[in-house]
Image (tube, coloured by chain):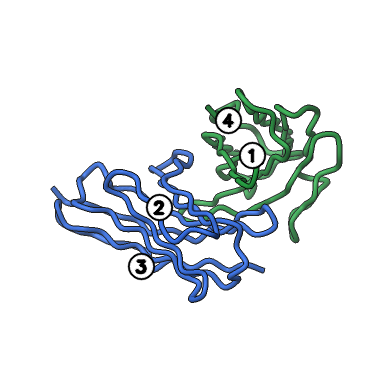
Amino acid sequence: GAVVSQHPSWVICKSGTSVKIECRSLDFQATTMFWYRQFPKQSLMLMATSNEGSKATYEQGVEKDKFLINHASLTLSTLTVTSAHPEDSSFYICSASLLAGASYTQYFGPGTRLTVL
Amino acid sequence: KQEVTQIPAALSVPEGENLVLNCSFTDSAIYNLQWFRQDPGKGLTSLLLIQSSQREQTSGRLNASLDKSSGRSTLYIAASQPGDSATYLCAGANDYKLSFGAGTTVTVRA
């Protein structure tokens, strides 16, 4: 149980285009979803936190107008990288949280490799 | 803000040797601490999760300890195998957010 999927697994796009990445919790309803970015040989950096039906909360230094997050349901969150540039090339990973009693766990998707030419 | 540090950054051992990976964190008010494995170009695989009320967790050859007072967690991998070669990340949860360390890249030589 507690499976999170991401689509696509990889994408290559031209500079200036927009790219949408989907994150789905397949077998549970997630109270909160998170988006992370990982540059080569670096750790995961939290970009934003989103709750279903409300605006995302962005971490300091993350441009909310560039990284649009929509959390339309308890099982789906999308990240749109608008007007992508080569410096946006990175590995994007989402997670979905499950609060069960006193236990809180984030379950991670397999990641999306974005390459901007 | 939670700061998580992992030492060493890289480790190479012969097959069969026990592995000890260290993780330190600055804010002891963590909700839980998780250890993950990441293979090159892949996502995260959760290995062990230790709740703040626990001192350790074990799964097979893996054992993780948590000492909140000193701000440290240690992941032990017994009798290492080449298949254990990967990057191991620890992450502390505060206010339902995870802060990750930079990871320790492990190479187990056959």
Distance from disc 3 to disc 2, alpha carbons, whole Å, reads: 22 Å
- State the image quarter where residue A10 is shown: top right
Q: Which amino acid does the dot numbered 2 rest on?
A: Gln
Q: Nearer the viewer, mark 1 or mark 4?
A: 1
The spot of residue B4 in percent (x, y) is 53, 66
**In the image, are marks 3 and 1 on the same chain?**
no
The chain that hosts pointer 3 is B
Q: Farthest residue in the top direction? A: A26
**Is residue A97 in view from this perspective?**
no
Is B27 above or below relative to A4?
below
Could you say whether the residue bearing mark 3 is in a helix, strand or loop?
loop
Q: Which residue is mark 3?
A: B8
Mark 4 and mark 2 in contact (Cβ < 8 Å)? no
Q: Report the chain holding disc 1.
A: A
Quadrant in the picture for residue B31: bottom right
Chain that is coloured blue in the picture: B
Given residues A28 and B81, the one toward you in this image is A28
Q: Counting other residues with Cα less than 10 Å from the Cα at mark 2, is it few (<14), some (14-19), or many (20 or more)?
A: some
User: Separation of disc 3 and disc 1 at Cα?
Assistant: 34 Å
Instruction: Output the letter for the chain in green.
Output: A
**What amino acid type is highlighted by mark number 3?**
Pro
Residue tagged by mark 1? A100
**Do the residues marked 1 and 4 share a common chain?**
yes
Residue identifier under label 4? A4
The residue pinned by badge 2 equals B57
Q: Secondary structure at mark 2?
A: strand
